[in-house]
Amino acid sequence: MNDATALQEFLRKAAYYRGLPQFETLERIYKLRLAHDLQEAATAMRGNAVEGLTLLKRAIQSPDDNLINWRDQNRFIEWMKRDSRQAKVALLGVWDATQPLDTRLRRAEASLYAAGLTQPSTQLTVISTLLMVLSPYDYPPIRTQPFRKAFEELALPDFRPSDPLPEGPAGCPKRGLVHL
């Protein structure tokens, strides 16, 4: 199958699934609720409200967050409890749209690595979920398994977040966001 045919077939499937009556409920609404809850937490943190991290924890542990694996959610929350000051600085940095995206991704990756979230695919999912604060439309959450399947269907080079990247560890979230 040539590239144009592969793309046409992929877009046909995407349009089919997007057109299903339950798509809105099953794939979109809960993510927008999660983005709203994350935005409330970010607003509280930006305003130095003490409950900012509590609101973020509530959003991450809500049924609407089926994006971040529960084990990774626990590690992320433990990090926020253990080092709340550093966590707040790191999170505000992710959401600082005045900084270049690449800079924010590299800093976030380093913070998550220090927090014990060392797998690039986990970092990609966590960072892309957190970026929904800025806009769930411009920064949709990325889970690597569906992303890899899409790459395969389009006959693109394999998207393997666990492979070493020439641009360094922050290349995984950056590569994922760039391809979107």
Image (tube, rainbow, N blue to C red):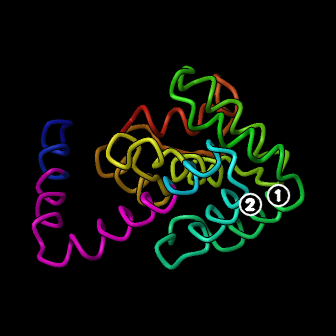
Residue topped by disc 1: 79
User: What numbered label is drawn on residue 76?
Assistant: 2
Residue lying at 83% horizontally and 53% vertically, measured from the top left: 84
Seen at 74% across and 60% down, the residue is: 76
Q: Which mark is residue 121?
A: none
Q: Distance of mark 1 from mark 2, alpha carbons? A: 5 Å
In this rendering, position of residue 84 left or right of residue 43: right
The answer to whether the residue labelled 1 contacts the one labelled 2, judged by CB atoms less than 8 Å apart, is yes
Q: Quadrant of residue 29?
A: bottom left
Q: Type of residue at label 1?
A: Trp
- As helix, strand or loop, the secondary structure at mark 1 comes to helix
**Residue depicted at 12% across the width and 46% down the height:** 8
- Name the foreground residue: 126 vs 82: 82
Q: Is residue 162 above or below residue 79?
A: above
Secondary structure mostly seen in the magenta stretch? helix
Residue 17 position by quadrant:
bottom left
Task: Name the residue rendered at 39%, 35% in the picture.
Answer: 179
Q: Is residue 136 left or right of residue 51?
A: left
Drawn side of residue 18 relative to residue 126, left or right? left
- Disc 1 residue crowd, few under 14, some 14–19, many 20+, Cα 10 Å: some
* Range drawn in magenta: 11-38
